[in-house]
C-alpha cells in the first residue's frame, strides 16, 4: 500500500471523527415548537408503527418484488424516518422565543407589523422558518421583508430590496400578539 493512500485514509478518518459545526439557531415561537413536537410524536408513536405492521404483514406474504404493500410501505418508512430525523435536528437547534405581550414599538422576532408600501397596507407576523405561511401573513425572520423591518420602530421608513425593485416601507403599527 502506498504512503499517499494511507495518508488520505488517515485524513478521511480524522475528518469524520471531528464534530461538525453547531447547527444554526432555529428561532421559533412556543406554538411552532409545540406543533413540531406534536408532529414528531404522531410520526413516531402512531404512523410509523402502523406502517411497520403493514410491511411486516406484506413481507410474510412471500414474493416481495411485486408486493405493492411491501414496496410502498418500505418507501413510506424511509420518508417517515427522514422526516423524524429532520424534526429532531430542528427541535434540538430550536431557540424558543415568546414575544407575547412585549411592550415595544420596535420590531423583533414575534412582532406583528402593519406597514404601508406602494399605497397598500399590509400586515405580517415575523416567525420562525418552520412556521412561515404567507396565506396567514407569517413570514420568516430571515426573509428580506423581515430583515428590512427588524430593529425599526413605528413611524420609521425602511428600504426593502425586492425582486421587483427597491421599495420603501412605512411602519404604521408594531404589536406582539400570541402566535397560534
Image: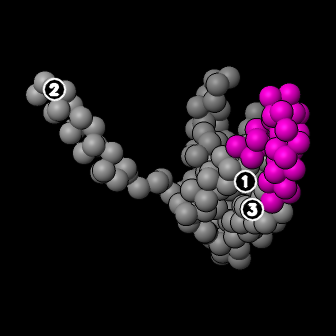
Q: Quadrant of the N terminus?
A: top left
Quick check: 8 left or right of 110?
left
Of all residues, the one furthest to the left in this rendering is 3
Residue at (58, 46) in percent of width and height: 142
| Viewer-side residue, 126 vs 87 | 87
Residue at (75, 46) in percent of width and height: 77
As drawn, the label of residue 131 is 1
Tell me the residue that label 2 is attached to. 1
SS label for mark 2: loop
Q: Can residue 22 be seen in this snapshot? A: yes
If you read the primary sequence from the N terminus, does the residue marked by circle 2 or circle 1 appear first?
2
| Residue 74: percent from left, percent from top | 76, 41
* Main SS of residues in magenta: helix
- Tell which tag, 1 or 3, sits nearer the viewer: 3
If you read the primary sequence from the N terminus, does the residue marked by circle 1 or circle 3 appear first?
3
- Tell which tag, 2 or 3, sits nearer the viewer: 2
| Residue 17: percent from left, percent from top | 30, 50
Circles 1 and 3: CB atoms closer than 8 Å? no
- Tell which tag, 2 or 1, sits nearer the viewer: 2
As drawn, the label of residue 44 is 3
| Magenta residue check for 162 | no
Asked if 34 appears above or below 166 in the picture, the reply is below
The region drawn magenta spans 49-78
| Residue 121: percent from left, percent from top | 82, 45
As drawn, the label of residue 21 is none
Quarter occupied by residue 179: bottom right
If you read the primary sequence from the N terminus, does the residue marked by circle 2 or circle 3 appear first?
2
Amino acid at each position: 500500500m502506498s504512503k499517499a493512500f494511507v495518508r488520505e485514509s488517515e485524513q478521511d478518518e480524522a475528518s469524520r471523527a471531528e464534530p461538525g459545526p453547531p447547527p444554526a439557531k432555529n428561532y421559533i415561537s412556543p406554538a411552532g415548537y409545540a406543533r413540531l413536537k406534536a408532529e414528531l410524536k404522531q410520526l413516531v408513536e402512531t404512523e410509523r408503527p402502523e406502517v411497520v405492521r403493514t410491511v411486516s404483514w406484506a413481507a410474510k406474504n412471500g414474493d416481495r418484488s411485486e408486493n405493492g404493500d411491501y414496496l410502498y410501505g418500505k418507501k413510506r418508512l424511509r420518508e417517515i424516518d427522514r422526516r423524524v430525523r429532520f424534526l429532531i435536528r430542528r427541535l434540538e437547534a430550536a431557540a424558543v422565543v415568546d414575544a407575547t405581550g412585549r411592550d415595544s414599538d420596535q420590531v423583533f422576532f414575534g412582532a406583528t407589523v402593519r406597514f404601508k408600501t406602494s399605497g397598500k397596507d399590509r400586515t405580517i407576523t415575523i416567525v420562525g422558518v418552520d412556521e412561515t405561511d404567507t396565506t396567514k401573513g407569517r413570514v420568516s425572520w430571515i426573509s428580506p421583508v423581515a430583515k428590512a423591518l427588524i430593529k425599526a420602530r413605528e413611524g420609521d421608513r425602511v428600504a426593502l430590496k425586492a425582486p421587483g425593485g427597491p421599495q420603501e416601507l412605512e411602519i404604521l403599527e408594531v404589536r406582539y400578539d400570541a402566535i397560534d
